[in-house]
Image (spheres, grey):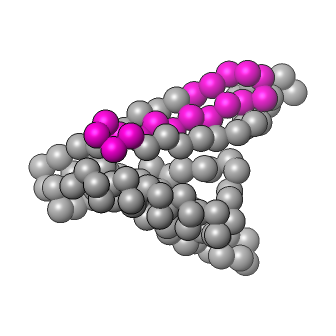
């Protein structure tokens, strides 16, 4: 049970977008442990809302598309945001619009 609380049970997730620097993604676990990932702005191609079929339903998720270093027009990988909290589409749209507004000022 303690392993589940320490490694699996996410208390909350956050996203911080700093236009000139990049994106910081943080997950805080019920045990108090926090995991933070930073993605440099130069590696980000775009932020998109994607959809998937999961157990007979359609779910939406926000993800960051990372550039291929050798081919800037191609996507090398995808980083999924808010994996544990799974916010509804209307919340994702608000976050997406805010992110796009910040990203558009950087380009």
Q: Is residue 6 above or below residue 13?
A: above
> Which quadrant would the N terminus be assigned to in this image?
top right
Q: Main secondary structure of the magenta part?
A: strand
Q: Does the magenta portion include 33?
A: yes
Q: Position of residue 12 (x, y in %)?
A: 70, 39
Q: Relative to the observer, which residue lies in front, 52 or 36? A: 36
Q: Position of residue 57 (x, y in %)?
A: 71, 76
One can see residue 65 in this view: no
Q: Residue at x 47, y 64 (%)?
A: 97
Q: Position of residue 4 (x, y in %)?
A: 79, 31
Quadrant in the picture for residue 34: top right
Q: Which residues are magenta?
A: 18-35
Q: Relative to the observer, which residue lies in front, 54 or 95? A: 95
One can see residue 70 in this view: yes
Extreme-right residue of the structure: 1
Q: Residue at x 54, y 58 (%)?
A: 95
Q: Residue at x 47, y 58 (%)?
A: 98
> Which quadrant would the C terminus be assigned to in this image?
bottom left
Count of number-bearing discs: 0
Q: Does the magenta portion include 75?
A: no
Q: Is residue 36 above or below residue 39?
A: above
């Amino acid at each position: 049970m303690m392993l589940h609380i320490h490694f699996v049970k996410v208390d909350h997730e956050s996203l911080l977008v700093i236009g000139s620097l990049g994106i910081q993604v943080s997950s805080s676990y019920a045990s108090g442990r926090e995991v933070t990932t930073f993605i440099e702005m130069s590696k980000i191609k775009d932020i998109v809302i994607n959809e998937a079929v999961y157990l007979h339903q359609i779910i939406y998720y926000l993800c960051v598309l990372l550039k291929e270093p050798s081919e800037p027009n191609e996507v090398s990988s995808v980083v999924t945001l808010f994996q544990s909290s799974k916010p509804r589409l209307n919340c994702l749209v608000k976050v997406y619009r805010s992110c796009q507004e910040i990203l558009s000022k950087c380009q």
